[in-house]
Amino acid sequence: MIFRQFIHDDLGCASYFVGDQDAGLGAVVDPRLAVEEYLDYSRYVDARIAHVLETHTHADHVSGHGRLASATGATIHVNALAEAEYPHEAFDDGWVLDLGDLRIRAVHTPGHRPEHTAFLLTDTARGEEPWAVLTGDTLFVGDVARPDLAVEREEGARAIFRSLRGRLLALAPETEVWPGHLGGSLCGGPGMDMKVSSTIGYERRHNQLLGLEDESEFVEQALAGLGPQPPNFRNIVALNRGPLMTDDVLVPALSPREVEERRAAGALLVDVRTDVQFDDAHIPGAVSIAADHAGFGTKLAWMAEPGGELVVVGRDEQDARRGAGLAAAVGMRGVAGVLAGGMTGWRVEGREIDRTERLDVHALHDRLGQDPELQILDVREADEWEEGHIPGSVHRPYHDLDELPGELEPGRPVAVICASGQRSAVASSMLRRLGAQRVLHVVDGGVPTWHRAGYGIEGPAPVRGISRPA
């Protein structure tokens, strides 16, 4: 029997290659857009990809089902309730697919989406009971799926409760759980673990939400932990439901002069280098979204205008093309090109650059005592802000920075802070693009570091103006 998990680290997505090597047959479940790994693995195990299975119509990433079908001739299968507009074979609850000794059974588990389906895996050469379940976006390690991406959120939460209680938790406790997402994905809640698998029995005992036997209490707790919805998710659903996308992501290399022209015409320049490299020197107006940290595609989808043109800037062209591929994975189809030669090519031509001042939390504390003009912008999520924030700071989640916050004066310096320095990297570059004249990027920590240093934290009520922390 063949079983292999593939993880898309940037989006926290998991997909699977399952099959029977003796029969020479395989299937890919929930493929990501870049399908080369599946094709390579198919050749390695000598098993033809004959089927592509979708647990549901994904809302956070573009599926590779079209590219796989084009490359292999595989048949795509999805629940009939998905109302897919591409060539496929629809199935209902209880549908069975046999691949040699591997039996795959569909278990309808609505809630995350109405069509959502888990897949039970049975190795019939060893026994008739399933040994594993691919839970898709219903049950995760340590958490459950969010219910608000397809239906009214309370309705979705109640459906998830019933799917869990009536279907998945009825499985034998030793049944392995292989989820569709790992920690960091926006399709789940804050309890999601980075662990790649679990068992029904372990989750039943240790997953906090699964311990709630009252449906109303489950709904209340599930909704309380909801984070922001994945950006661009309606467009991604439409892409995954609509005509098959079979083309590779091909983008041209643009000369520095061509990039300058695109920038002047309104294109968003996305710099995928590290925040250290960006702060040291970057193209004026570019936004910093480092591709070497998880969540690049999600951050980009929040920052980019729908339908707007993008140009990707990297250390070199290979670095930028990786960023362009990650952008395509979240449905960003407007990548006009990458900067030829990377930032080195830009600087060799002596073109204009900008810099961002960096300081750590302790330097920020000292600066506040010296500069009465300094403002602080906290770009964490609302629940983080409410747990405690720097006195006098202004709050705006980084993904909501579509204009300069009214509480900030553009002529005064502003220090941008989060919890670690990653979100503040994106926000500080965006703030400069929005007209702030002097932006300081707080690095090597954030508000939790400030609190641990004993500098003083206040509760959720925001204070206008800057008060000096003790």
Image (tube, rainbow, N blue to C red):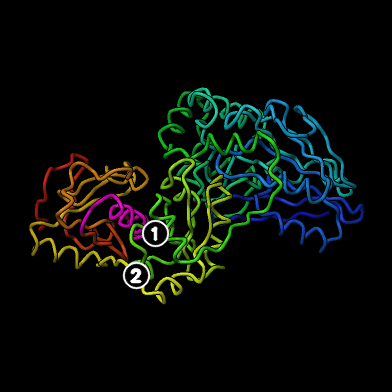
Residue 168 lies, with reference to residue 114, above or below; the image says below
The mark found on residue 288 in the picture is 1
**Residue 326, position as x, y percentages in the image:** 55, 55
Which residue is tagged 2? 281
Q: Which is the main secondary structure of the residues drawn in magenta?
A: helix
**Residue 222, position as x, y percentages in the image:** 46, 33
Q: Dot 2 lies on which element?
A: loop
The mark found on residue 376 in the picture is none
**Is 173 on the left or on the right of 374, as rendered?**
right
Q: Dot 1 lies on which element?
A: strand
Query: Which corner quadrant of the image does residue 6 belong to?
Result: bottom right
Q: Is residue 357 magenta?
A: no
Q: Label 2 is placed on what type of residue?
A: Ala
Q: Closest to the observer: 193 or 380?
A: 380
Measure the C-alpha gap from mark 2 to mark 1: 11 Å
- Identify which residue is drawn at 69% across, 49% down: 247
Q: Which residues are magenta?
A: 421-437
- Identify which residue is drawn at 19% across, 49% down: 393
